[in-house]
Image (cartoon, rainbow, N blue to C red):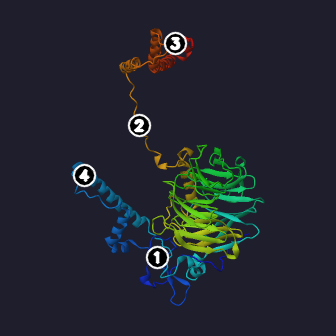
Amino acid sequence: MLILVPSISAASLRAASSQAFPKRRLKRERTTDLSFQKTAAAAPCDRQASLTFLPFLFISMGSKEENGDGEMDQTVKKYLRGEAANLEGLQDKKLKGQLAIREELYGKSAKAAAKIEKWLLPSEGGYLEAEGIEKTWRIKQESIAREVDILSLRNQYDIVLPELGPYTIDFTPNGRYMAAAGRKGHLAVVDMKTLSLIKEIQVRETVRDVVYLHNELFFAAAQKKYPYIYNRDGTELHCLKEHGAVSRLQFLKNHFLLASINKFGQLHYQDVTMGEMVGNYRTGSGRTDAMQVNPFNGVVALGHSSGTVTMWKPTSAAPLVKMLCHPGPVSSLAFHPNGHLMATSGKEKKIKIWDLRKFEVIQTLSGHAKTLNFSQKGLLAAGTGSFVQILGDFSGSQNYSRYMSHSISKGYQVGKVLFRPYEDVLGIGHSMGWSSILIPGSGEPNFDSWVANPFETSKQRREKEVHSLLDKLPPETIMLDPTKVGTVRPARKKEKKPTKEEREAEMEAAVEAAKDTDIKKKTKGRNKPSKRAQRRKEIIDRAKRPFLEHWVEEQETFRKKQKTNMETEMPKSLQRFVRQKAT
Protein backbone atom coordinates (compact mmCIF):
# COMPACT_ATOMS: atom_id res chain seq x y z
CA MET A 1 0.00 0.00 0.00
CA LEU A 2 1.32 3.43 -0.94
CA ILE A 3 1.55 6.16 1.70
CA LEU A 4 2.15 9.63 0.31
CA VAL A 5 4.39 11.49 2.75
CA PRO A 6 6.02 14.85 1.97
CA SER A 7 9.77 14.58 1.96
CA ILE A 8 12.09 16.67 4.05
CA SER A 9 13.04 18.67 0.95
CA ALA A 10 9.46 19.47 0.08
CA ALA A 11 8.84 22.94 -1.31
CA SER A 12 6.11 24.89 -3.00
CA LEU A 13 5.38 28.06 -4.80
CA ARG A 14 2.18 29.13 -3.12
CA ALA A 15 2.51 31.19 0.03
CA ALA A 16 1.08 34.26 1.66
CA SER A 17 3.60 36.31 3.51
CA SER A 18 3.35 39.72 5.06
CA GLN A 19 3.20 42.87 2.97
CA ALA A 20 6.96 43.26 3.31
CA PHE A 21 9.17 44.69 0.61
CA PRO A 22 6.48 46.71 -1.20
CA LYS A 23 9.08 48.30 -3.50
CA ARG A 24 10.15 44.89 -4.84
CA ARG A 25 6.85 44.23 -6.50
CA LEU A 26 7.67 42.47 -9.75
CA LYS A 27 5.87 41.54 -12.94
CA ARG A 28 2.51 39.95 -12.39
CA GLU A 29 1.09 37.89 -15.15
CA ARG A 30 -1.13 35.15 -13.77
CA THR A 31 -1.30 32.94 -10.69
CA THR A 32 -3.53 30.06 -9.63
CA ASP A 33 -6.22 30.26 -7.00
CA LEU A 34 -3.82 29.14 -4.31
CA SER A 35 -0.72 30.73 -5.89
CA PHE A 36 0.63 34.09 -4.96
CA GLN A 37 2.98 36.69 -6.38
CA LYS A 38 6.58 35.54 -6.07
CA THR A 39 9.78 37.54 -5.80
CA ALA A 40 13.33 36.37 -5.30
CA ALA A 41 15.59 38.62 -3.25
CA ALA A 42 19.17 38.08 -2.23
CA ALA A 43 19.95 38.23 1.48
CA PRO A 44 22.49 40.94 2.33
CA CYS A 45 24.74 38.66 4.38
CA ASP A 46 24.10 35.26 2.88
CA ARG A 47 24.94 33.99 -0.60
CA GLN A 48 21.96 31.68 -0.64
CA ALA A 49 18.94 33.28 -2.29
CA SER A 50 15.90 33.93 -0.13
CA LEU A 51 12.41 34.21 -1.50
CA THR A 52 9.79 36.78 -0.65
CA PHE A 53 6.25 36.05 -1.74
CA LEU A 54 3.78 38.87 -2.22
CA PRO A 55 0.20 37.74 -1.61
CA PHE A 56 -2.40 37.97 -4.33
CA LEU A 57 -5.77 39.29 -3.19
CA PHE A 58 -8.96 38.64 -5.09
CA ILE A 59 -10.03 42.07 -6.25
CA SER A 60 -13.68 42.88 -5.88
CA MET A 61 -15.75 44.95 -8.29
CA GLY A 62 -15.37 48.13 -6.25
CA SER A 63 -11.58 47.91 -5.94
CA LYS A 64 -11.24 47.30 -9.70
CA GLU A 65 -13.21 50.44 -10.47
CA GLU A 66 -11.02 52.52 -8.16
CA ASN A 67 -8.01 51.88 -10.40
CA GLY A 68 -9.60 54.03 -13.09
CA ASP A 69 -9.32 53.56 -16.79
CA GLY A 70 -5.53 53.35 -16.82
CA GLU A 71 -5.39 49.61 -16.16
CA MET A 72 -8.17 48.97 -18.68
CA ASP A 73 -6.32 50.99 -21.33
CA GLN A 74 -3.19 48.89 -20.82
CA THR A 75 -5.22 45.69 -21.19
CA VAL A 76 -6.86 47.03 -24.36
CA LYS A 77 -3.44 47.80 -25.84
CA LYS A 78 -2.43 44.19 -25.28
CA TYR A 79 -5.26 42.96 -27.52
CA LEU A 80 -4.99 45.61 -30.23
CA ARG A 81 -3.64 44.42 -33.59
CA GLY A 82 -0.72 46.81 -33.77
CA GLU A 83 -0.89 50.50 -34.47
CA ALA A 84 -3.91 51.95 -36.25
CA ALA A 85 -3.58 52.71 -39.95
CA ASN A 86 -2.95 56.33 -40.96
CA LEU A 87 -6.03 57.27 -43.00
CA GLU A 88 -5.27 60.95 -43.50
CA GLY A 89 -3.09 60.49 -46.56
CA LEU A 90 -5.55 58.25 -48.42
CA GLN A 91 -7.18 59.76 -51.49
CA ASP A 92 -9.59 56.88 -52.17
CA LYS A 93 -12.73 57.68 -50.14
CA LYS A 94 -14.16 54.18 -50.49
CA LEU A 95 -10.98 52.51 -49.21
CA LYS A 96 -10.71 55.10 -46.45
CA GLY A 97 -14.24 54.32 -45.26
CA GLN A 98 -13.64 50.56 -45.33
CA LEU A 99 -10.43 50.85 -43.31
CA ALA A 100 -12.11 53.18 -40.80
CA ILE A 101 -14.89 50.61 -40.23
CA ARG A 102 -12.32 47.83 -39.82
CA GLU A 103 -10.27 49.83 -37.31
CA GLU A 104 -13.44 50.50 -35.32
CA LEU A 105 -14.22 46.77 -35.23
CA TYR A 106 -10.68 46.01 -34.07
CA GLY A 107 -11.07 48.52 -31.24
CA LYS A 108 -14.40 47.04 -30.15
CA SER A 109 -12.99 43.48 -30.16
CA ALA A 110 -9.99 44.60 -28.09
CA LYS A 111 -12.27 46.25 -25.51
CA ALA A 112 -14.46 43.13 -25.36
CA ALA A 113 -11.38 40.93 -24.81
CA ALA A 114 -10.16 43.27 -22.06
CA LYS A 115 -13.54 43.07 -20.28
CA ILE A 116 -13.48 39.27 -20.53
CA GLU A 117 -10.01 39.19 -19.00
CA LYS A 118 -11.13 41.54 -16.24
CA TRP A 119 -14.12 39.49 -15.09
CA LEU A 120 -13.50 35.93 -16.31
CA LEU A 121 -9.72 35.76 -15.77
CA PRO A 122 -9.39 37.12 -12.22
CA SER A 123 -6.27 35.15 -11.29
CA GLU A 124 -2.82 36.22 -12.30
CA GLY A 125 0.38 34.21 -12.43
CA GLY A 126 3.92 35.05 -11.56
CA TYR A 127 7.35 33.50 -11.81
CA LEU A 128 10.58 33.64 -9.92
CA GLU A 129 12.69 36.74 -10.36
CA ALA A 130 16.12 37.28 -8.86
CA GLU A 131 17.75 40.51 -7.84
CA GLY A 132 21.28 41.58 -8.59
CA ILE A 133 23.65 38.81 -9.55
CA GLU A 134 21.38 36.07 -8.23
CA LYS A 135 20.11 33.51 -10.74
CA THR A 136 16.75 31.79 -10.55
CA TRP A 137 18.21 28.38 -11.44
CA ARG A 138 20.36 28.51 -8.30
CA ILE A 139 17.33 28.70 -6.03
CA LYS A 140 16.86 25.31 -4.38
CA GLN A 141 13.62 23.66 -3.43
CA GLU A 142 14.82 23.66 0.18
CA SER A 143 15.01 27.45 0.09
CA ILE A 144 11.44 27.70 -1.13
CA ALA A 145 10.21 25.17 1.44
CA ARG A 146 10.91 27.52 4.34
CA GLU A 147 8.63 30.21 2.90
CA VAL A 148 5.49 28.30 1.95
CA ASP A 149 2.33 27.32 3.77
CA ILE A 150 1.20 23.83 4.73
CA LEU A 151 -1.25 23.36 1.85
CA SER A 152 1.40 24.20 -0.70
CA LEU A 153 3.87 21.94 1.06
CA ARG A 154 1.69 18.92 0.22
CA ASN A 155 2.27 19.41 -3.52
CA GLN A 156 5.96 18.54 -3.15
CA TYR A 157 6.83 14.97 -2.26
CA ASP A 158 9.00 11.96 -3.14
CA ILE A 159 7.67 8.41 -3.42
CA VAL A 160 10.43 5.79 -3.22
CA LEU A 161 9.57 2.29 -4.49
CA PRO A 162 12.94 0.82 -5.45
CA GLU A 163 11.72 -2.70 -6.24
CA LEU A 164 9.03 -1.68 -8.77
CA GLY A 165 10.63 1.07 -10.88
CA PRO A 166 11.40 2.75 -13.16
CA TYR A 167 8.09 4.65 -13.23
CA THR A 168 6.12 6.55 -15.85
CA ILE A 169 3.21 8.85 -15.00
CA ASP A 170 0.22 10.54 -16.63
CA PHE A 171 -2.29 13.17 -15.47
CA THR A 172 -5.94 13.64 -16.34
CA PRO A 173 -6.73 16.71 -18.50
CA ASN A 174 -7.93 18.62 -15.41
CA GLY A 175 -4.88 17.66 -13.32
CA ARG A 176 -6.92 16.10 -10.52
CA TYR A 177 -5.76 12.49 -10.83
CA MET A 178 -2.48 10.78 -11.64
CA ALA A 179 -1.76 7.27 -12.92
CA ALA A 180 1.67 5.80 -12.16
CA ALA A 181 3.05 2.66 -13.79
CA GLY A 182 6.15 0.78 -12.65
CA ARG A 183 8.13 -1.31 -15.10
CA LYS A 184 7.77 -4.35 -12.78
CA GLY A 185 3.95 -4.37 -13.11
CA HIS A 186 2.78 -1.90 -10.47
CA LEU A 187 -0.18 0.35 -11.42
CA ALA A 188 -1.51 3.04 -9.06
CA VAL A 189 -4.18 5.76 -9.27
CA VAL A 190 -3.73 8.78 -6.96
CA ASP A 191 -6.03 11.69 -6.15
CA MET A 192 -3.71 14.69 -6.33
CA LYS A 193 -6.07 17.01 -4.46
CA THR A 194 -6.24 14.93 -1.29
CA LEU A 195 -3.02 12.97 -1.94
CA SER A 196 -4.89 9.74 -1.29
CA LEU A 197 -4.35 6.42 -3.02
CA ILE A 198 -7.50 5.35 -4.90
CA LYS A 199 -6.36 1.97 -6.19
CA GLU A 200 -3.19 0.01 -6.84
CA ILE A 201 -2.83 -3.32 -8.63
CA GLN A 202 0.00 -5.66 -9.59
CA VAL A 203 -0.32 -7.06 -13.13
CA ARG A 204 2.79 -9.27 -12.71
CA GLU A 205 4.34 -8.38 -16.06
CA THR A 206 6.28 -5.57 -17.70
CA VAL A 207 4.47 -2.22 -18.09
CA ARG A 208 6.06 0.20 -20.55
CA ASP A 209 3.59 3.11 -20.61
CA VAL A 210 0.32 4.35 -19.16
CA VAL A 211 -2.17 6.92 -20.43
CA TYR A 212 -5.57 8.19 -19.27
CA LEU A 213 -8.51 8.04 -21.65
CA HIS A 214 -11.24 10.72 -21.81
CA ASN A 215 -11.63 10.95 -18.00
CA GLU A 216 -10.26 9.49 -14.78
CA LEU A 217 -12.49 6.40 -14.90
CA PHE A 218 -10.44 4.61 -17.58
CA PHE A 219 -6.75 4.28 -18.34
CA ALA A 220 -4.69 2.14 -20.71
CA ALA A 221 -1.43 0.38 -19.88
CA ALA A 222 1.10 -0.93 -22.41
CA GLN A 223 2.07 -4.29 -20.98
CA LYS A 224 4.46 -7.03 -22.10
CA LYS A 225 2.43 -8.53 -24.98
CA TYR A 226 -0.64 -6.32 -25.42
CA PRO A 227 -2.11 -3.04 -24.13
CA TYR A 228 -4.94 -3.37 -21.59
CA ILE A 229 -7.70 -0.97 -20.56
CA TYR A 230 -8.60 -0.76 -16.86
CA ASN A 231 -11.23 1.13 -14.95
CA ARG A 232 -10.69 3.22 -11.86
CA ASP A 233 -11.18 0.20 -9.57
CA GLY A 234 -8.40 -1.75 -11.28
CA THR A 235 -10.74 -4.08 -13.17
CA GLU A 236 -9.47 -5.24 -16.56
CA LEU A 237 -11.99 -4.23 -19.23
CA HIS A 238 -10.30 -4.90 -22.58
CA CYS A 239 -7.25 -6.62 -24.02
CA LEU A 240 -6.24 -4.99 -27.31
CA LYS A 241 -4.43 -7.88 -29.02
CA GLU A 242 -4.36 -6.21 -32.44
CA HIS A 243 -1.84 -3.62 -31.19
CA GLY A 244 0.85 -6.16 -30.29
CA ALA A 245 3.74 -5.41 -27.93
CA VAL A 246 3.27 -1.66 -27.55
CA SER A 247 6.09 0.64 -26.46
CA ARG A 248 4.21 3.99 -26.39
CA LEU A 249 0.56 5.06 -26.00
CA GLN A 250 -1.22 8.35 -26.72
CA PHE A 251 -4.90 9.32 -26.51
CA LEU A 252 -6.60 11.83 -28.82
CA LYS A 253 -9.34 13.19 -26.55
CA ASN A 254 -11.26 15.13 -29.22
CA HIS A 255 -11.45 12.10 -31.52
CA PHE A 256 -11.62 9.33 -28.86
CA LEU A 257 -8.74 7.51 -30.57
CA LEU A 258 -6.12 5.43 -28.78
CA ALA A 259 -2.85 5.58 -30.75
CA SER A 260 0.00 3.14 -30.16
CA ILE A 261 3.36 2.26 -31.68
CA ASN A 262 4.70 -1.26 -31.15
CA LYS A 263 8.22 -2.65 -31.23
CA PHE A 264 7.89 -3.56 -34.92
CA GLY A 265 7.19 0.04 -35.93
CA GLN A 266 3.45 -0.42 -36.54
CA LEU A 267 1.19 2.52 -35.78
CA HIS A 268 -2.37 1.69 -34.69
CA TYR A 269 -5.44 3.90 -34.20
CA GLN A 270 -8.41 2.44 -32.36
CA ASP A 271 -11.74 4.11 -31.64
CA VAL A 272 -12.45 3.49 -27.94
CA THR A 273 -16.16 4.30 -28.28
CA MET A 274 -16.98 1.59 -30.87
CA GLY A 275 -13.86 -0.58 -30.61
CA GLU A 276 -13.19 -0.19 -34.33
CA MET A 277 -9.61 -0.22 -35.64
CA VAL A 278 -9.41 3.03 -37.62
CA GLY A 279 -5.86 2.71 -38.93
CA ASN A 280 -2.97 0.21 -38.98
CA TYR A 281 0.16 1.38 -40.79
CA ARG A 282 3.80 0.35 -41.00
CA THR A 283 6.06 3.31 -40.46
CA GLY A 284 8.98 1.64 -42.20
CA SER A 285 11.46 3.25 -39.79
CA GLY A 286 11.77 0.54 -37.15
CA ARG A 287 11.15 0.76 -33.43
CA THR A 288 10.63 4.14 -31.81
CA ASP A 289 10.42 5.33 -28.21
CA ALA A 290 9.41 8.94 -28.96
CA MET A 291 5.72 9.55 -29.60
CA GLN A 292 3.60 12.67 -29.00
CA VAL A 293 0.28 14.14 -30.16
CA ASN A 294 0.07 17.72 -31.39
CA PRO A 295 -2.73 19.31 -29.29
CA PHE A 296 -3.47 21.80 -32.08
CA ASN A 297 -4.38 19.42 -34.91
CA GLY A 298 -4.32 15.87 -33.48
CA VAL A 299 -1.38 14.76 -35.66
CA VAL A 300 0.81 12.04 -34.12
CA ALA A 301 4.59 12.61 -34.33
CA LEU A 302 7.12 9.78 -34.10
CA GLY A 303 10.86 10.15 -33.54
CA HIS A 304 13.01 7.48 -35.23
CA SER A 305 16.54 6.14 -34.87
CA SER A 306 17.48 7.62 -38.25
CA GLY A 307 17.07 11.15 -36.85
CA THR A 308 13.78 11.78 -38.67
CA VAL A 309 10.44 12.84 -37.24
CA THR A 310 7.34 11.68 -39.09
CA MET A 311 3.81 13.02 -38.62
CA TRP A 312 0.78 10.81 -39.20
CA LYS A 313 -2.99 10.92 -39.39
CA PRO A 314 -5.31 7.88 -39.18
CA THR A 315 -6.64 8.19 -42.73
CA SER A 316 -3.28 8.16 -44.54
CA ALA A 317 -0.90 5.23 -45.03
CA ALA A 318 1.98 7.63 -45.76
CA PRO A 319 3.34 10.25 -43.35
CA LEU A 320 2.09 13.80 -43.79
CA VAL A 321 5.54 15.20 -42.98
CA LYS A 322 8.96 13.56 -42.83
CA MET A 323 11.66 15.91 -41.56
CA LEU A 324 15.29 15.26 -40.69
CA CYS A 325 15.77 16.76 -37.22
CA HIS A 326 19.02 15.23 -35.95
CA PRO A 327 22.03 13.42 -37.41
CA GLY A 328 21.52 10.64 -34.86
CA PRO A 329 18.55 8.93 -33.16
CA VAL A 330 15.73 11.10 -31.78
CA SER A 331 15.46 10.46 -28.05
CA SER A 332 12.43 12.62 -27.23
CA LEU A 333 10.02 15.24 -28.57
CA ALA A 334 7.30 17.53 -27.24
CA PHE A 335 4.73 20.01 -28.58
CA HIS A 336 3.93 23.49 -27.30
CA PRO A 337 0.26 23.93 -26.25
CA ASN A 338 -0.33 26.28 -29.20
CA GLY A 339 0.80 23.51 -31.57
CA HIS A 340 3.19 25.75 -33.53
CA LEU A 341 6.40 24.84 -31.70
CA MET A 342 8.06 21.45 -31.38
CA ALA A 343 11.06 20.54 -29.26
CA THR A 344 13.25 17.56 -30.16
CA SER A 345 16.37 16.10 -28.58
CA GLY A 346 18.94 13.82 -30.16
CA LYS A 347 21.76 11.57 -29.08
CA GLU A 348 24.28 14.14 -30.31
CA LYS A 349 23.39 16.21 -27.18
CA LYS A 350 21.38 18.91 -28.92
CA ILE A 351 17.88 20.23 -28.16
CA LYS A 352 16.17 21.95 -31.08
CA ILE A 353 13.11 24.19 -31.11
CA TRP A 354 11.17 23.96 -34.40
CA ASP A 355 8.59 26.29 -35.93
CA LEU A 356 6.03 23.92 -37.47
CA ARG A 357 4.50 26.64 -39.62
CA LYS A 358 7.73 26.89 -41.63
CA PHE A 359 9.35 23.57 -40.57
CA GLU A 360 12.65 25.21 -39.68
CA VAL A 361 14.84 25.44 -36.58
CA ILE A 362 14.50 28.65 -34.60
CA GLN A 363 16.83 27.75 -31.72
CA THR A 364 19.42 25.09 -30.90
CA LEU A 365 20.39 24.40 -27.29
CA SER A 366 23.28 22.29 -26.07
CA GLY A 367 22.52 19.39 -23.77
CA HIS A 368 21.00 15.94 -23.85
CA ALA A 369 17.39 15.22 -22.86
CA LYS A 370 15.90 11.78 -22.44
CA THR A 371 12.44 13.27 -21.95
CA LEU A 372 10.83 16.62 -22.83
CA ASN A 373 7.55 18.28 -21.90
CA PHE A 374 5.92 21.70 -22.36
CA SER A 375 3.78 23.30 -19.66
CA GLN A 376 0.51 25.14 -20.26
CA LYS A 377 2.34 28.48 -20.05
CA GLY A 378 5.12 27.42 -22.40
CA LEU A 379 7.90 26.34 -20.01
CA LEU A 380 10.02 23.46 -21.32
CA ALA A 381 11.20 20.70 -18.97
CA ALA A 382 14.13 18.52 -20.03
CA GLY A 383 15.27 15.53 -17.99
CA THR A 384 18.36 13.40 -18.35
CA GLY A 385 20.24 11.24 -15.86
CA SER A 386 19.37 12.55 -12.40
CA PHE A 387 19.04 16.18 -13.51
CA VAL A 388 15.95 18.16 -14.56
CA GLN A 389 16.24 21.54 -16.25
CA ILE A 390 13.43 24.04 -16.88
CA LEU A 391 13.69 26.45 -19.79
CA GLY A 392 11.50 29.52 -20.29
CA ASP A 393 10.71 32.04 -23.01
CA PHE A 394 10.23 35.21 -20.97
CA SER A 395 11.02 37.67 -23.74
CA GLY A 396 8.25 36.42 -26.02
CA SER A 397 10.69 36.09 -28.91
CA GLN A 398 10.80 32.27 -28.82
CA ASN A 399 14.26 32.39 -27.29
CA TYR A 400 14.43 29.84 -24.48
CA SER A 401 16.86 30.30 -21.62
CA ARG A 402 17.51 28.51 -18.32
CA TYR A 403 14.89 29.18 -15.65
CA MET A 404 15.14 26.50 -12.94
CA SER A 405 17.02 23.29 -12.26
CA HIS A 406 16.58 20.35 -9.92
CA SER A 407 18.73 17.35 -9.08
CA ILE A 408 17.13 14.07 -8.03
CA SER A 409 18.58 12.78 -4.80
CA LYS A 410 20.88 9.74 -4.70
CA GLY A 411 21.34 9.67 -8.45
CA TYR A 412 17.90 8.35 -9.43
CA GLN A 413 17.60 8.18 -13.23
CA VAL A 414 14.82 10.32 -14.69
CA GLY A 415 12.49 8.44 -17.05
CA LYS A 416 9.70 10.94 -17.69
CA VAL A 417 8.83 14.54 -16.81
CA LEU A 418 5.26 15.79 -17.07
CA PHE A 419 3.70 19.09 -15.98
CA ARG A 420 0.48 18.86 -14.00
CA PRO A 421 -2.32 20.87 -15.68
CA TYR A 422 -3.62 23.97 -13.88
CA GLU A 423 -0.95 23.68 -11.18
CA ASP A 424 2.63 24.90 -10.83
CA VAL A 425 3.77 21.32 -10.38
CA LEU A 426 6.16 19.11 -12.34
CA GLY A 427 5.85 15.34 -11.96
CA ILE A 428 9.01 13.27 -12.39
CA GLY A 429 9.01 9.52 -12.94
CA HIS A 430 12.41 8.00 -12.14
CA SER A 431 14.10 4.67 -11.53
CA MET A 432 13.15 4.51 -7.85
CA GLY A 433 9.59 5.88 -7.91
CA TRP A 434 8.19 9.30 -8.68
CA SER A 435 8.59 12.82 -7.35
CA SER A 436 6.79 16.15 -7.54
CA ILE A 437 8.49 19.53 -7.58
CA LEU A 438 7.00 23.00 -7.90
CA ILE A 439 7.75 25.29 -10.84
CA PRO A 440 6.47 28.89 -10.54
CA GLY A 441 4.39 30.06 -13.49
CA SER A 442 4.08 26.71 -15.26
CA GLY A 443 0.33 26.10 -14.85
CA GLU A 444 -2.62 27.96 -16.30
CA PRO A 445 -4.20 29.88 -13.38
CA ASN A 446 -7.70 30.27 -14.87
CA PHE A 447 -9.47 27.05 -15.75
CA ASP A 448 -12.61 26.84 -17.85
CA SER A 449 -15.08 24.51 -16.13
CA TRP A 450 -16.56 23.59 -19.52
CA VAL A 451 -13.16 22.34 -20.72
CA ALA A 452 -11.39 20.98 -17.63
CA ASN A 453 -12.66 21.39 -14.08
CA PRO A 454 -10.34 20.16 -11.30
CA PHE A 455 -13.25 20.34 -8.85
CA GLU A 456 -15.93 18.64 -10.96
CA THR A 457 -18.50 16.41 -9.32
CA SER A 458 -19.67 13.01 -10.57
CA LYS A 459 -22.77 14.61 -12.11
CA GLN A 460 -20.66 17.18 -13.96
CA ARG A 461 -18.36 14.40 -15.14
CA ARG A 462 -21.27 12.43 -16.59
CA GLU A 463 -22.64 15.52 -18.31
CA LYS A 464 -19.24 16.32 -19.76
CA GLU A 465 -18.80 12.75 -21.00
CA VAL A 466 -22.12 12.86 -22.85
CA HIS A 467 -21.32 16.25 -24.41
CA SER A 468 -17.83 15.14 -25.45
CA LEU A 469 -19.28 12.04 -27.13
CA LEU A 470 -21.79 14.18 -29.00
CA ASP A 471 -18.99 16.55 -30.06
CA LYS A 472 -16.64 13.73 -31.07
CA LEU A 473 -14.69 14.58 -34.22
CA PRO A 474 -14.29 12.04 -37.04
CA PRO A 475 -10.76 10.88 -37.93
CA GLU A 476 -10.99 12.71 -41.27
CA THR A 477 -10.76 16.06 -39.47
CA ILE A 478 -7.14 15.36 -38.44
CA MET A 479 -4.89 17.37 -40.75
CA LEU A 480 -1.87 19.66 -40.58
CA ASP A 481 -4.00 22.81 -40.91
CA PRO A 482 -7.30 22.24 -39.05
CA THR A 483 -8.46 25.77 -39.87
CA LYS A 484 -9.43 24.46 -43.31
CA VAL A 485 -12.19 22.38 -41.75
CA GLY A 486 -15.52 24.12 -42.35
CA THR A 487 -14.23 26.42 -45.07
CA VAL A 488 -15.53 26.43 -48.63
CA ARG A 489 -13.18 25.27 -51.34
CA PRO A 490 -12.89 27.95 -54.03
CA ALA A 491 -14.64 26.98 -57.24
CA ARG A 492 -12.36 26.11 -60.09
CA LYS A 493 -12.78 27.97 -63.30
CA LYS A 494 -14.11 25.64 -65.93
CA GLU A 495 -12.09 25.56 -69.09
CA LYS A 496 -14.09 26.87 -71.97
CA LYS A 497 -14.45 24.16 -74.61
CA PRO A 498 -13.75 25.31 -78.16
CA THR A 499 -16.70 25.31 -80.54
CA LYS A 500 -16.90 23.20 -83.69
CA GLU A 501 -16.01 26.16 -85.93
CA GLU A 502 -12.95 26.98 -83.79
CA ARG A 503 -11.70 23.37 -83.92
CA GLU A 504 -12.16 23.30 -87.71
CA ALA A 505 -10.25 26.58 -88.03
CA GLU A 506 -7.41 25.20 -85.89
CA MET A 507 -7.26 22.04 -87.99
CA GLU A 508 -7.19 24.03 -91.24
CA ALA A 509 -4.38 26.19 -89.85
CA ALA A 510 -2.42 23.06 -88.91
CA VAL A 511 -3.01 21.60 -92.41
CA GLU A 512 -1.82 24.80 -94.09
CA ALA A 513 1.29 24.83 -91.92
CA ALA A 514 1.94 21.18 -92.89
CA LYS A 515 1.53 21.96 -96.61
CA ASP A 516 4.15 24.68 -96.36
CA THR A 517 6.67 22.28 -94.85
CA ASP A 518 9.79 21.94 -96.95
CA ILE A 519 10.53 18.39 -98.07
CA LYS A 520 14.15 17.41 -98.30
CA LYS A 521 15.41 16.25 -101.66
CA LYS A 522 16.45 12.63 -101.78
CA THR A 523 18.42 10.61 -104.33
CA LYS A 524 18.14 7.24 -106.08
CA GLY A 525 14.53 7.54 -107.16
CA ARG A 526 13.16 8.80 -103.83
CA ASN A 527 12.59 12.30 -105.18
CA LYS A 528 9.93 11.40 -107.72
CA PRO A 529 6.76 13.60 -107.74
CA SER A 530 4.65 10.65 -106.56
CA LYS A 531 6.99 10.03 -103.62
CA ARG A 532 7.02 13.71 -102.70
CA ALA A 533 3.17 13.85 -102.82
CA GLN A 534 2.97 10.75 -100.62
CA ARG A 535 5.29 12.26 -98.04
CA ARG A 536 3.34 15.53 -98.02
CA LYS A 537 0.10 13.59 -97.48
CA GLU A 538 1.65 11.77 -94.52
CA ILE A 539 2.65 15.11 -92.97
CA ILE A 540 -0.89 16.48 -93.42
CA ASP A 541 -2.44 13.31 -91.89
CA ARG A 542 -0.05 13.57 -88.93
CA ALA A 543 -1.20 17.17 -88.35
CA LYS A 544 -4.88 16.17 -88.53
CA ARG A 545 -4.55 13.16 -86.20
CA PRO A 546 -4.82 14.97 -82.77
CA PHE A 547 -8.00 16.77 -83.83
CA LEU A 548 -9.57 13.58 -85.18
CA GLU A 549 -8.70 11.59 -82.03
CA HIS A 550 -10.22 14.31 -79.86
CA TRP A 551 -13.37 14.26 -81.97
CA VAL A 552 -13.65 10.44 -81.67
CA GLU A 553 -13.30 10.66 -77.85
CA GLU A 554 -16.08 13.24 -77.64
CA GLN A 555 -18.34 11.08 -79.78
CA GLU A 556 -17.70 8.04 -77.54
CA THR A 557 -18.43 10.06 -74.38
CA PHE A 558 -21.62 11.46 -75.89
CA ARG A 559 -22.74 7.95 -76.95
CA LYS A 560 -22.14 6.54 -73.45
CA LYS A 561 -24.10 9.35 -71.80
CA GLN A 562 -26.96 8.84 -74.23
CA LYS A 563 -26.99 5.10 -73.54
CA THR A 564 -27.01 5.70 -69.75
CA ASN A 565 -29.85 8.17 -70.06
CA MET A 566 -31.89 5.69 -72.12
CA GLU A 567 -31.40 2.97 -69.48
CA THR A 568 -32.37 5.26 -66.62
CA GLU A 569 -35.46 6.57 -68.42
CA MET A 570 -36.81 3.05 -69.11
CA PRO A 571 -38.59 1.22 -66.25
CA LYS A 572 -36.65 -1.59 -64.63
CA SER A 573 -39.01 -4.21 -65.98
CA LEU A 574 -38.40 -3.04 -69.58
CA GLN A 575 -34.68 -2.37 -69.46
CA ARG A 576 -33.88 -5.97 -70.41
CA PHE A 577 -35.67 -5.46 -73.74
CA VAL A 578 -33.42 -2.54 -74.74
CA ARG A 579 -31.39 -3.48 -77.81
CA GLN A 580 -27.75 -3.89 -76.98
CA LYS A 581 -25.38 -2.44 -79.57
CA ALA A 582 -22.57 -4.67 -80.77
CA THR A 583 -19.14 -3.65 -79.58
Q: What residue did someone put label 1 on?
A: 56
| Nearer to us: label 2 or label 3 | 3
Measure how far apart labels 1 and 2 are at the Cα level.
55 Å
Decide: marks 1, 3 in contact (CB < 8 A)? Answer: no
- Which residue is identified by label 3? 524
Image position of 367 with respect to 502: above or below: below
Where on the picture, by quarter, is residue 491? top left
Image quarter where the N terminus lies is bottom right
Residue at the extreme right of the image, as rendered: 204
Q: Is residue 499 left or right of residue 545?
A: left
Could you tell me if the residues under marks 1 and 2 are in contact, i.e. CB atoms within 8 Å?
no
Q: Nearer the viewer, mark 1 or mark 3?
A: 3
Three-letter residue code for mark 2 = Ala
Q: Amino acid at mark 1?
A: Phe
In the figure, is residue 256 to the left or right of 448?
right
Residues at marks 1 and 4, CA–CA distance in whole angstroms: 46 Å
Q: Amino acid at mark 4?
A: Gly
Q: Secondary structure at mark 3?
A: loop
Residue at mark 4 to residue at mark 2: CA–CA distance: 30 Å
Q: Residue at x 40, y 73 (%)?
A: 60
Q: Which class describes the residues within 10 Å of circle 3: few (<14), some (14-19), or many (20+)?
A: few
Residue 456: where, in percent of width, then height? 55, 62
